[in-house]
Amino acid sequence: MTAAIRRFFDHDLWWSFSRSPLTVGAALVTLAFLLAALLAPWVAPHDPFDPASLDLLDAFTPPVWTERGDPRFLLGTDDQGRCVLSTIVWGSRISLLVGFAAVLLSAALGVALGVSAGYLGGAYEAVVMRLADVQLTIPGILVALTINGVARTLVPRELQEAAAIWVLVLAIGISDWPKYARLARGTTLVEKSKEYVAAARVIGLHPLRIMVRHLLPNVMGPVLVIGTIGLALAIISEATLSFLGVGVPPTTPSLGTLIRIGNDFLFSGEWWITLFPSLALVLLVLAVNLLGDWLRDAFNPKLR
Amino acid sequence: MSAPPLVAVEGLARRFDVSRPWLARLLTREPRRWLQAVAGVDFAIPRGTTMALVGESGCGKSTVARMLVGLLQPSAGRILFDGSPLDPRAGRKALAPVRRRMQMIFQDPYASLDPRWRVADIVAEPLDAFGLVASRAERRERVAELLRAVGLSPADGSKYPHEFSGGQRQRISIARALASRPDFLVCDEPTSALDVSVQAQILNLMKDLQERLGLTYLLISHNLAVVSLMADRVGVMYLGRIVELAPAEELFTRPRHPYTRLLLDTVPDLELRRRERVPVAGEVPSPIDPPAGCAFHPRCPWANGRCRAERPEPLPVGAARVACHAVEEGRLLA
């Protein structure tokens, strides 16, 4: 165990990580968001989803450092008297949840299709990859909107609020798979020609077993890198859909929903309702993106 | 050769489709193009012996190896293993008993071991695949035994391939090939990626194992020194065909086919005691568009009209089998 820890700190990856202050900063910010999201019930000063604790008289309180600020609400409150800081913490939780789940879905879908297409080849590969090409010609957000709309009409009305998050995950996940499929197929083509795959075929292993046990682990490295960058994009997609009003409902707001709600009050002077969720979104996406960029460079032997 | 051969190959051929895509072909009215990698190859390997296939790169020797172990399907001809023909189109389950008995050692020890697997799992892969071990303890014991057999320590099983040198990796590769207790090993250039000092160690290991386990080898190599050390019989391949097949000493002391002579002449001879060297120029022609007649005639100093028109059939000459008009007619006497 101690040897494993020592190896970790001896590793090139750790070296390149600790040498880049930007990356360390990005990692800290991401970690902070993750912790806040995970521990939201204990971190957030208020529970913004509990109607009993809300008081409409607190509505539109500006941030604490302004003239009419209230020490109970650090970043002010929104139109329903919800603490903006708390909604950001809870909102990040939903944004991150949707982001992770969507990346997981699209990566699983894309890697499964990409690896099998690369390994099996032939007509199956042609169909899968042309499908990916076709979907790439349509803007992702449009695909997500379409899937979202179709899924919503299929979900019964009384379940819509509860299912909203999973409909979003489905929409973003499906809109993003071609990227993973292309990457997985390319990496599979490289790995497939290596002799360890031939050795497995000489033994007569089932193609499925070769794909799962040999190709998959060797394809996951690059996928992890793209997945990190994909997480940032998925969070933005979620925010966009929620901003457009087709995402999560206002009762359980994500960062995108918060920005949209705040937008309604921007012209009446209550700038803090939209500004702080926006800043949180920018910070989160930037941090995750920087981490992804660093991972990509660190894994690229040509840049080392 | 009284005992029936373990492996025999009859009229083995393989061609590859190298045509341009369908649409491009349709537009340019170009016919399909085929690359004849292997054509009409016959040989038999007696149990417990080593047969080598030598030739320049692109002569089809690796294709023969890959067909034998089932990585490629033959376009024509058949493979007999232990007397019964191998049906490459048979199902995975039906082929398993034969697959267990034939394994392969690969050229590049840096690519032939999955970098994400521990050595013990790599070596045990055939054991798991063929269901040869009943318990984890038995598996561990068998892996330790295999690692010891190739000169590694059982403790190496918990390491990853990148922690080993090229020679050690090739030992792991051999241990994996031996795991299912095969009778027949196809060795595709097993030492050409290794340092010269390590090559000898691996070759000695292979000879030891052959003696101890009664293995039969098919050795693919372009290195004549390796071949002369290892092989009992040697087949010289040129453009997909065996042009000369002879016992090893015979081939090295009395090469008959002009191409075999060319190959042996290219081996540096420190004492300069060999006969006068015949300069042979030129390169291997394209197997997509092979020359008519004898494929070697554009480079052969003894070629005549017949060589350019008629393909020579392999004919017995002494203990050898040679496909050459000049040898048959006695035009060429060494």
Image (tube, rainbow, N blue to C red):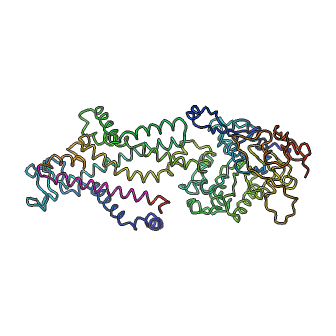
Is B41 placed left or right of A48 in the picture? right
Q: Residue at x 55, y 37 (%)?
A: A122
Is B179 placed left or right of A206 in the picture? right
Give the x, y percent position of residue B69: 68, 44
Residue B138 visible from this viewpoint: no
Q: Residue at x 67, y 55 (%)?
A: B174
Within the image, what quadrant is residue A292 found in?
bottom left
Residue A281 visible from this viewpoint: yes
Question: Magenta part mainly helix, strand or loop?
Answer: helix
Q: Residue at x 48, y 63 (%)?
A: A304
Depth check: B252 or B71 in front? B252
Give the x, y percent position of residue A42: 23, 57
Q: Is residue A115 above or below residue B262?
A: above
Is B219 placed left or right of A34 in the picture? right
Magenta-colored stretch includes residue A274: yes
Magenta-colored stretch includes residue B287: no
Q: Residue at x 83, y 41 (%)?
A: B307
> What span is in magenta?
A268-296
Depth check: A280 or B322 in front? B322
